[in-house]
Amino acid sequence: MNAAKAQSKDFLLAVEGLTVSFDGFKAVDDLSFYLDPKEIRVIIGPNGAGKTTVLDLICGKTKATSGSIKFDGKELTRLKEHQIVHSGVGRKFQTPSVFEDLTVFENLEVSYPQGHSVMGALAFKRSAEVVAAVEDVAETIFLKDALEQPASLLSHGQKQWLEIGMLLIQKPDLLMLDEPVAGMSVAERKKTAELLRRITKDHTVLVIEHDMQFVGDIADRVTVMHQGKVLSEGSIEHVKSDPKVIEVYLGH
Amino acid sequence: MKNTSPLKWFASREGLYYLALALLLVVILPLALDPFRLNMVGKYLTYAFVAIGLVMCWGKAGILSLGQGVFFGLGGYCMAMFLKLEASTPEATAIQSTPGIPDFMDWNQLTELPWFWEPFHSFSFTLLAIVGVPVLLAFIIGFAMFTRRVGGVYFAIITQAIAAILTILIIGQQGYTGGVNGITDLQTLMGWDIRTDEAKTILYFVCVGLLFVCLFVARFVQNRKLGRILVAMNAQENRVRFSGYDVAAFKIFVFCLAAAFAGIGGALFTLIVGFMSPSFIGIVASIEMVIFCALGGRLSILGAVYGALLVNAAKSGFSESFPELWPFAMGALFIGVVLAFPNGLAGLYQTYVMPLEDRLFKRKPKAAVSAPAKPAPAARQDEGRDYDPMLDQYSPEKS
């Protein structure tokens, strides 16, 4: 036990024996994997493999039945969602979830990591620092010219970028992205890959993605999930040539 | 709205709307109406406090409470208890078998003042309780519900049930609460007779003053980041949560804020009307309050004031001629609002009247490129931003 603890310290994220069961159905079953700092890990797998559930478990949306999630030496399974965010985990959802009634600027401002308490939000001032941080992130996510637009007017791809920007401004250590290029045009996909590559210089990223071309573009390592378990793990070439992966996911 | 001097603010479009309301309530209505009618307007205005709270709670944050009457009633009962104790001096109640306690207690064979009535001898305690008791109950309900993620229609049903429970409790505990008759025969406030025409007129102005205080508090909250989080929470609760906010805390806050407004409204109601009874706080009363808010426009705090005024005026007018038809008319009104103009009067105003204003004052349309020949009469330092009565705030600042 002690040895495992010491070992897990070297990883940014250590998921061990993670299990969640919904009325007896184990969506995630004794899952273990480890993320190094600054690594880009992509999780792939057929529908229902439990990929999104893993992200839900890490960010606290779903509570684990058993197992442990250690992030930077901290146990996440006991924390509430907003506490997990404060410890440095950012999560992007599959469908773009931005605040449609607010402008792009306000979307980013609300995500700025300051004034998170009720009183803090009452006292929060739009300081030069905040404006600078918002503009900086807007530049990164290609939305510098759209700052004053209501988010509802953005295209699907732009909304995805905005949500990524809302994570970036939180300055998380771990970014979790659920299918960031789903529904994007080819041009948008390219830009997103570029965006992710830029982001990953300072962040550890955990991505769920189906597009194998895109996966090959960005992944350091790939984890293939099947029926709540790890089926295969390694470089993209390794998993692509793994007969088990070909069997259940990639097809012949 | 940074670095805005108050004077400039009053010349802004939003400021003018507030001025118009102040003009109506402080000058026009007192001049046009006799003290009796003015007193009635004062009564309607006490409901506007509740409606403002509902705008914040329901319109902005999406928490529909069908039990605001509870908080209105608690504020009202706190005030009524104080006034009743003042009216129940041993001299005034000498004919009772136990002099010095409220008359209804004596009728119910109580021989001493219940413990929870004791603190209401103190006026400062009463003032504290008018806000504190509703807020405390709202906090308990909010904490129990929101930390367990109870929301939407379930929350509405629970608040409705609480309204029913409180009514039944008050009616059942006649000896302690005055029962179905309520607490009546209130006479003086710190020795000042509240039943005279003069007192009623003064109370009306006190009510208007406090209403503006509440309006400015609500406006302050909605213009801060907190206000944006409330709106954001309404549509994307999970995104707010995963942006690092404790959603339950924000919901509890806005629910307590609405309860505080309702409590103040209730206390003023007791002063203006002269008594408090369970009929003002039950299920029907609570739903009526939601209708005031919906008709005025559930996204606009100013709209809520007009909604409360108009629906209540219609209610009085209707009830004077066809008392039995009013519930049907109100039901029809509610259905009409929900179906035809979900954003209420404020929404209609924005769609139909504001473009007229723009033309009348030669305001630059939003996308105008050419500069106007001379500044519009009500030109603001933040020209180009448009006041949005639906959200009751300016469109975002151009940087």
Image: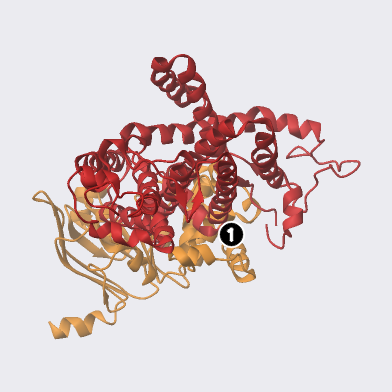
Chain colours: A orange, B red
Q: Secondary structure at mark 1?
A: helix
* Total tally of numbered discs in the picture: 1
Q: Which residue is mark 1?
A: A138
Above or below, A135 relative to B229: below
Mark 1: which amino acid?
Ala
Q: Residue at x 54, y 49 (%)?
A: A102
Residue B266 in percent (x, y) is at 43, 45
Quadrant of the rendered image containing residue B65: top left
Q: Residue at x 56, y 32 (%)?
A: B36
Question: Quadrant location of the N terminus of chain B?
Answer: bottom right
Which of the pair B113/A160 is nearer the observer? B113
Task: Tell me if B355 is positioned left or right of B57 in this view.
Answer: right
Residue A91 in percent (x, y) is at 38, 59
- Residue reaching furthest to the right: B373
Above or below, B382 relative to B47: below
Residue B156 in percent (x, y) is at 31, 40
Q: Chain of mark 1?
A: A
Task: Tell me if A22 is positioned left or right of A15 in this view.
Answer: left
Above or below, A244 relative to A78: above
Q: Residue at x 26, y 69 (%)?
A: A76
Which of the pair A124/B221 is nearer the observer? B221
